[in-house]
Amino acid sequence: MGRYFNLMKTSAASTRIADYSLAIDTSAGTTVAVLSMGTVIAEVNYLEPMTHSERIGSAIEKVLADSGIQANQISTVVAGVGPGPFTGLRVGLAAARYFAIGAQAELVGVCSLDSIALDFYIGNPSAGNLLVTTDARRKEVFWATYSGVVEGVPVRTHGPSVNKLEDIAGFIDASSHATTELGVRAGALGQIAFAQELAGVANRKDITPIYLREPDAVPSKGKKVSG
Amino acid sequence: MAIEIRQATVLDLPEIMKLETDSFANDAWPEETFKSELAAKHTYYILALEDNLVVGYAGLSKLPGSDQADIQTIAVREDKRGLGIGKKLMDTLTLQATELGAKEIFLEVRADNSAAQKLYKLFGFKQIGTRKKYYQPDGVDAFIMKTDMRLKTNKETVVLGIETSCDETGVGIVRGNQLLANIISSSMDKHAIFGGVVPEIAARAHLEALTPVLDEALEKANLTLDDIDAIAVTNGPGLAGALMVGVGAAKALAVATGKPIYAVNHLVGHVGADILDSGELKTPTIALLVSGGHTSLLLVRDLLNDVELLGETIDDAAGEAFDKVARVLSLSYPGGPEIDRVAKDGNPNAIRFPRGLTLPKDMEKHRYDFSFSGLKTAVARHVELAESKGEEFSIADVASSFREAVVDVLIKKAVSACKEFDVPRLLLGGGVVANARLREVAKEQCEANGIELRIPPFTLCTDNGAMIAAIGAQLIMAGRAPSTLNFSAESTLPVTTVQS
């Protein structure tokens, strides 16, 4: 593994906006990006949904190397807080927490689905309502709706929630919403966090995952074991 | 066979030359070359001696002012190869190079000598180039290999260990063999209403506990992350989703701080825990690890190089059996302490519950394996039968007799392993070691059979990060290269894989 020189931090907290950020999301595949003042300067995306814990270390190492940024120059870690399949989602959030401690950076959480919305509206600036869905397994989807982007931040109108795809019609008029095949991208999460900062929108300082489902477990009924 | 390592002098030249010409048939150094090598001020040559006879040698060159060192040569007598002598020589040389201020160590090796290359890789050497037809007259290529300087290899190396394989989030810090901090956050209470560990609940709790546990460990050790030399993390065996939390966190911390990372086997960690209590691990030893997730009997000849799984449970872990029987008796979770409490007033011989895998026919195939599923069912049948007949029964007697059956099998098999393998030591580990009767019977049986019994304190027996840090420190002190960043969380990691 690479060795990093202990360069002095380049800035004080008050000029945080001018600094570098690392964005991490494992709500679907493994996606990691380094941004400089809200501009992506390196990004890696691994689409496989099952290899987060293998990928995460070298993915972070690679974006740092590609960007030429030292770990301790990172002043903000942006974490995709889901929703997404739990086991994978947690790998990125665990990594974000410990990277932030190791690099003495601040943590910011962004809803993973927001990154899909941002990328969609950048490609379709005049589009109206958007329905974003991702696979939640068990024949359900994680979903949210958006009305557009204001000052670089997607405006969420519903969700995030988890439902059967056909049941979403009970919440929104699906026919008036565009849909997209785009996936979660760490770079877009970093852009959103930066835009929130610029716009003075409070961003999530806590990076508690958006699970949307309780753990699968049934309280013990006790006793009967032999039957 | 004790191997002694000492520095070589010109007086050793005749012995060395004998080995040199035997070892390097076509490309041995001339005597004059070797003589000037031994005499030079910038070289460091060592011998491996057995009964005062030279069985190996190796040499290093390090020019003053340079931050690079070169391994010049290494040889082990043909009939003494494969015994770890080469490893000892390399260990001493790489340490010496680091002490002399080398940041990088280089060497050349014949392209066709895979045994030597394997040895060098153990010390982190990687191929960085090839010299065509370097070895004459054979015309064989040389691989150029390089490794980074070794970590502080004295007893001062500081390692942070992270453990998330089941329901305990542990971060521990050690300095060499010494315990500095051992912080554990358990999600046990959250599993209580389910009567057993729920993997998803455990994994959620790990994520929440990561930061506070790390902060507390650093505070307890009175250190900052800058003081940590390396990071160790459990990558198996255990619950996959739980393991992944620790693995993801540890990798990111390693990249953020530029520290090397060691992926460590959880079960070997339990064995290594004793180092932190007694300052060393006496080997060989039999180790009995009993917890809610494991019931394993190990023969440990050498902590890092030779751990053999003699047997394990073929169904429930012993701790799991305690939990399930506690449920049958309407006792609360976790079952171990509850059954211990109730059993105090009972008669252990009131009911003869079955001892799993102890019949002669089972002993053939499962000599050191365990089975608690049948026992659990027998207890349940006993209780249900009594209830269906409307009979009163003594919970204390049932609990006591059940506990006796578990302890009986565990200790009998462990003691018989000690005898069969002629190993006069038994080490206990795992959360079930808290069980009073288990400790009592272990003590009695070990005393009766002349076996030295080791039971580390409970905070080192239950799952914890300190034992993982301890294995990390042992790996570093043995000169092992760090793990690469791509290792995975492996729920069924075999005990033979000490480091991934």
Image (cartoon, coloured by chain):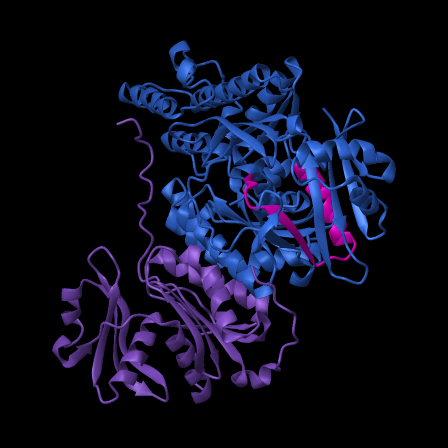
Judge left or right: residue B465 versus residue A52.
right
Q: Nearer the viewer, residue A125 or B54?
A: B54
Q: Extreme top residue here?
A: B360
Q: Quadrant of residue A227?
A: top left
What residue occupies the far front of the structure in this picture?
A: B137
As rendered, which of B380 and B490 lies closer to the eye?
Answer: B490
Residue B48 visible at all: no
At 65% from the left and 61% from the top, the residue drawn is: B225
Q: Nearer the viewer, residue A116 or B217?
A: A116
Q: Tell me residue B30's x, y (percent).
A: 76, 41
Question: Could you tell whether B291 is left or right of A223 in the image?
Answer: right
Which colour is chain A painted? purple
Query: Relative to B279, does residue A181 appear above or below in the rendering?
Result: below
Residue drawn at (71%, 47%), measured in percent from left and top? B72
Q: Position of residue B76 (x, y in %)?
A: 68, 34
Relative to residue A9, is residue B273 depicted above or below?
Answer: above
Q: Nearer the viewer, residue B21 or B7?
A: B21
Question: Does residue A132 show up magenta in the picture?
Answer: no
Callout count:
0
The x, y position of residue B65, in whole percent, is: 80, 63
Specify the quadrant of the image occupied by residue B148: bottom right
| Residue range of the region highlighted in magenta in the rendering | B86-114
Q: Position of residue B25 (x, y in %)?
A: 65, 35
In this rendering, does residue B305 appear at all? yes
Q: Residue B95 magenta-drawn?
A: yes
Chain shown blue: that is: B
The quadrant of the image that shows the N terminus of chain B is top right
What residue is rendered at 50% in x and 56% in y? Answer: B485
